[in-house]
Amino acid sequence: MKMRVALDTNILAYAEGIGEKQKQTRAIRLVEQLPVDVILIPAQTLAELYRVLTVKAERNRQESRSAILGWADSFDVADSTWASFQTAFDLSVDHQFSIWDALILSVASENHCRILLSEDMQNGFTWSGVTIVNPFVIPPDPLLESLLKEDK
């Protein structure tokens, strides 16, 4: 069984062409290299991405909706449950995560992810079996590298 990988909003935003060119290229490469069946997108990240696309990138709402639906068509999307919110509250209190980052981590854990790719959470933090990995850090995280090599 392969490791599951959850994607945070910033990975999707870079893959949508927002932000630094190097990070865009890396995000696109990651999405292309990771096996489709291991990628999970918490629904919260799609809501955040819609806001980034419409506000920061100033895309129209139709185009933004199409982008969101494209991600949802391509990968598994996991909903937030009351249990994931309860856990997120604990993560927020105990580890100082924003409630929305905590919710993404909680959903990743509920869905048996081993890695949560995120640029702006606590790189290397492991909770309930999920390790937050910043894919832009050099040298790359060994956990992510082993997953990418596994598929070759």
Image (tube, grey):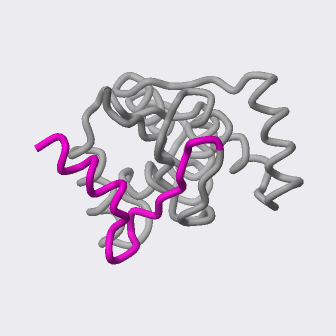
Horizontal and vertical percent position of residue 84: 74, 30
Which of the 4 image quadrants contains residue 139?
A: bottom left
Horizontal and vertical percent position of residue 5: 42, 40
**What residue occupies the far bottom of the structure in this picture?**
138
Left or right position of 148 against 120: left
Nearest the camera: 3 or 59?
3
**Which region shows up in magenta?**
128-152
Nearest the camera: 131 or 42?
131
Horizontal and vertical percent position of residue 8: 53, 49
Q: Is residue 147 magenta?
A: yes
Q: Quadrant of the C terminus?
A: top left
Q: Looking at the image, which residue is at 28% across and 47% down?
A: 147
Left or right position of 122 against 59: right
**What residue occupies the far left of the structure in this picture?**
152
Which of the 4 image quadrants contains residue 81?
A: top right
Q: Is residue 120 magenta?
A: no
Q: Is residue 21 above or below residue 66?
A: below
Horizontal and vertical percent position of residue 88: 79, 41
Q: Looking at the image, which residue is at 89% across and 54% down?
A: 93
Q: Looking at the image, which residue is at 65% across and 48% down?
A: 127
